[in-house]
Amino acid sequence: MERLSPPFYLELSAADWRLKREFFADRFNNCRLCPRQCGANRQNNHSGVCRAGREVKIASHNLHFGEEPPISGCRGSGTVFFSGCTLSCLFCQNYPISQLFHGEFYQVEQLAGIFLSLQKRGSHNINLVSPTPYLHHIMGALEIARAKGLAIPLVYNTSGYDRAEVIAQLEGVVDIYLPDLKYGPSESSRLLALELSGAGDYFEYAAAAIAEMFRQTGPLQLDDNEVAVRGTVIRHLIIPGSTENSLEVLRTIAASDFKEAWLSLMSQYFPAHRAAGCTPFNRRLQPEEYRLVRDEALKLGLENGWFQEM
């Protein structure tokens, strides 16, 4: 397969950059970047529901080898873990970052330096984890970094709880989308989303956002070394005691406009954070639960991607 090159953001004109930066700057103050639209006056350092304030906060940045194989490749994914999250998942494995807001503050110029440093170390891409609250900062950092030679694909690694209007403004910026689709559309799944992630409206936002992501990038495309260069991969974590929710998610994907997106079906759940005290979420996935969901994915023809065996 022929390498798709260059990354989208290298093709943006100065006028396009200005318009996109104005869009994100406008929604940064009295914040309206995520579905909660909490209106936090972040320019005056009032934190939003996600805990983010005026400055960008980062928990870690390094080469990461634990993503899906085409994302990590052989040299690693240049992963930047942003502090805070638009969700508050009871079982979050990264809760010190997402909910306790651990990390350090950086200036936009320093964030650009992180991108360039990861590229210099050989990373296949820049992988932005939970980036939505910081889109204003990210756009500024990307503009600086591309002027200094950044030229690897950009990965948008998100919970899926995003506004399609905001994702639409990332067209021409993001090469690879890596969203979760955690919950299905039924009332029982809506209540599960409210209980476990504090977002009863999760599905309506996530489905619309993923449709927009797929419209921009299409199915995953790989270069000659089997490394991802463009496309959308949907992640779904199977939750103990909630196989009906997982079956809903799979059926929704199979019936959607984004059914050709690649699927990453994950069995790695463990009772992290507050899940340890909540039945049935205080246990690992059972083999029969995993097999039921995996078999449904195969039955539906969702074969492009990865099934994480137990």
Image (spheres, grey):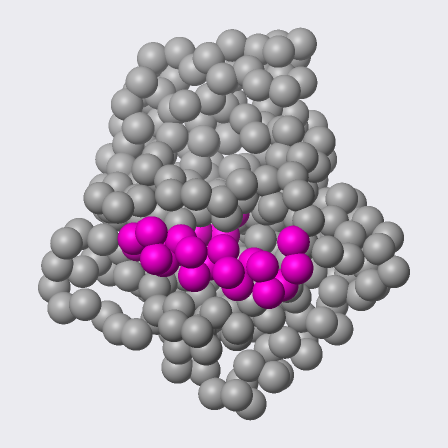
Q: Is residue 214 above or below residue 201?
A: below
Residue 191 is at least partly visible in this image:
no
Vertical relation: 64 (above or below) 127: above
Would residue 119 be counted in the magenta stretch? yes
Residue for point 21% across, 58% down: 222
In the image, taking residue 176 as reference, residue 56 lies left or right, namely right
Q: Quadrant of residue 303?
A: top left
- Please state if 71 lies on the left or on the right of 36 as rendered: left
Q: Position of residue 28 (x, y in %)?
A: 74, 65
Q: Position of residue 173 (x, y in %)?
A: 46, 71
Query: Residue, x 65% and y 39% (percent of image)?
Result: 103
Residue displayed at 59% across by 33% down? 189
Residue 98: image quadrant is: top right
Residue 159 position in % (x across, y down)? 55, 44
Percent x, y of residue 199:
69, 40
Q: Which span of residues is magenta-colored?
A: 106-129
**Visible in this render: residue 279?**
yes
| Residue nearest the viewer, comparing 53 with 260 | 53
Residue at 48%, 64% in the rendered image: 212
223 part of magenta stretch: no
Q: Quadrant of the C terminus?
A: top left
The quarter in which the N terminus is drawn is bottom left
215 relative to 122, above or below:
below
Q: Along the horizontal axis of the image, is 285 left or right of 36?
A: left
